[in-house]
């Protein structure tokens, strides 16, 4: 196949994938929402979940986005160094956003800084945001699309703490932010925490923590225990679905870490809303594919 024909095929595939992810929540999110609904003990909390699931069903039936805020598009790519379209990947992803925005349609959310003008097509300076990780000796592209909505982006914060503040300082940092801004992110929340030595690494890791499957745990037993303790503590606050009280406030807590400088302890926080539109696809060198986050689905 001619290279330009292959590129257009990739553009169309990623556009269809992006459209689909706007309209259908991932399997793990749906399963977790069902589990959380069953754990609620008040009729009012169950009514909120009923509204969420009615919303999900209508999005499927009407082929419309699950949430009207389809966010700023972010791509996280694990791309093999032998993937045949690696040289055209960034351009293909931008073109796919343009196409998906028209066809889905997706709400126009790219506002140029300083110009204060909406581009009207979800593409702008450095947007869609694209992060690439190279995988040696592979011809496979594993691609995550994430729709960073306004509500779930609002609680985002990162700070460098004095090491003396320790992990207690990290817990205080997380609880202070969730109890002040968490309601804006449409609970139940997925909470991503990054711990590192500098502010930008911690912030980036907190976003990558949101890309992990629900129920996964940090590979370090101490990190896994901290995830569990923070999750239990946040649920104990009683924010509940929609921020309208309930026994379950978070879908999960994920922590990602990087070795830090001895003199700094940086922490970042990112949140995902109940309509957490994070989807993974595996695309082979011949452009055949499997949806990893929506098993058995076709696009």
Image (cartoon, helix red, strand yellow):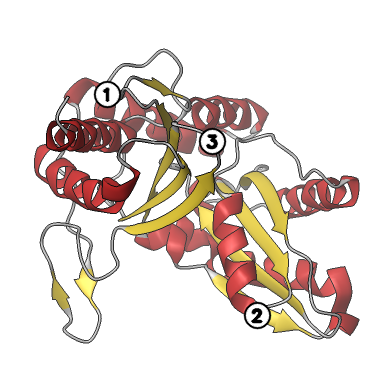
> Image height check: is 125 above or below 90?
below
- Element at label 2: strand
Q: Which residue is drawn at 26% across and 48% down?
A: 88
Q: Residue 27, image x and y in percent?
A: 49, 25
In the picture, the quarter occupied by the C terminus is top left
From the image, state whether disc 1 or disc 2 is nearer to you: 2
Q: Residue 125, image x and y in percent?
A: 24, 71
Between 281 and 88, the residue placed more toward the observer is 88
**Residue receiving disc 1:** 60
Q: Residue at x 68, y 49 (%)?
A: 254
Which label is found at residue 137? 3
Mark 1 near mark 2, Cβ–Cβ under 8 Å?
A: no
Q: How far apart are marks 3 and 2 (CA)?
A: 38 Å
From the image, state whether disc 3 or disc 2 is nearer to you: 3
Q: Can residue 64 be seen in this view?
A: no
> Image height check: is 60 above or below 261?
above
First-in-chain label (1 vs 2): 1
Q: How far apart are marks 1 and 3 (CA)?
A: 39 Å
Q: Residue 195, image x and y in percent?
A: 73, 66
Which label is found at residue 159? 2
Mark 1 near mark 3, Cβ–Cβ under 8 Å?
A: no
Which label is found at residue 37? none
Left or right: 90 with respect to 293?
left
């Amino acid at each position: 196949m001619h290279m330009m024909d292959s590129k257009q095929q990739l553009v169309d595939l990623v556009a269809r994938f992006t459209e689909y992810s706007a309209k259908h929540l991932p399997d793990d999110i749906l399963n977790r929402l069902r589990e959380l609904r069953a754990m609620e003990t008040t009729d009012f909390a169950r009514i909120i979940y009923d509204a969420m699931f009615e919303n999900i069903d209508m999005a499927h039936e009407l082929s419309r986005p699950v949430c009207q805020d389809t966010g700023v598009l972010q791509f996280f790519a694990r791309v093999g160094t032998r993937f045949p379209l690696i040289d055209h990947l960034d351009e293909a992803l931008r073109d796919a956003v343009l196409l998906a925005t028209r066809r889905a349609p997706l709400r126009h959310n790219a506002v140029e800084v300083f110009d204060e003008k909406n581009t009207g097509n979800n593409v702008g300076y450095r947007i869609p945001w694209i992060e690439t990780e190279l995988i040696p000796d592979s011809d496979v592209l594993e691609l995550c699309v994430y729709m960073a909505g306004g509500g779930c982006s609002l609680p985002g914060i990162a700070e460098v703490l004095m090491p003396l503040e320790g992990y207690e300082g990290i817990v205080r940092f997380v609880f202070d932010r969730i109890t002040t801004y968490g309601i804006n992110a449409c609970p139940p929340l997925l909470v991503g925490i990054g711990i590192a030595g500098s502010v930008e690494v911690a912030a980036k890791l907190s976003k990558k923590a949101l890309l992990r499957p629900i129920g996964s745990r940090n590979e370090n037993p101490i990190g896994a225990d901290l995830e569990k303790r923070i999750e239990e503590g946040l649920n104990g606050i009683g924010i509940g679905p929609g921020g309208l009280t309930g026994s379950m406030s978070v879908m999960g807590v994920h922590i990602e870490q990087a070795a830090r400088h001895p003199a700094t302890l940086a922490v970042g926080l990112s949140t995902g809303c109940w309509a957490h539109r994070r989807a993974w696809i595996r695309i082979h060198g011949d452009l055949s594919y499997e949806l990893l986050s929506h098993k058995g689905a076709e696009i």
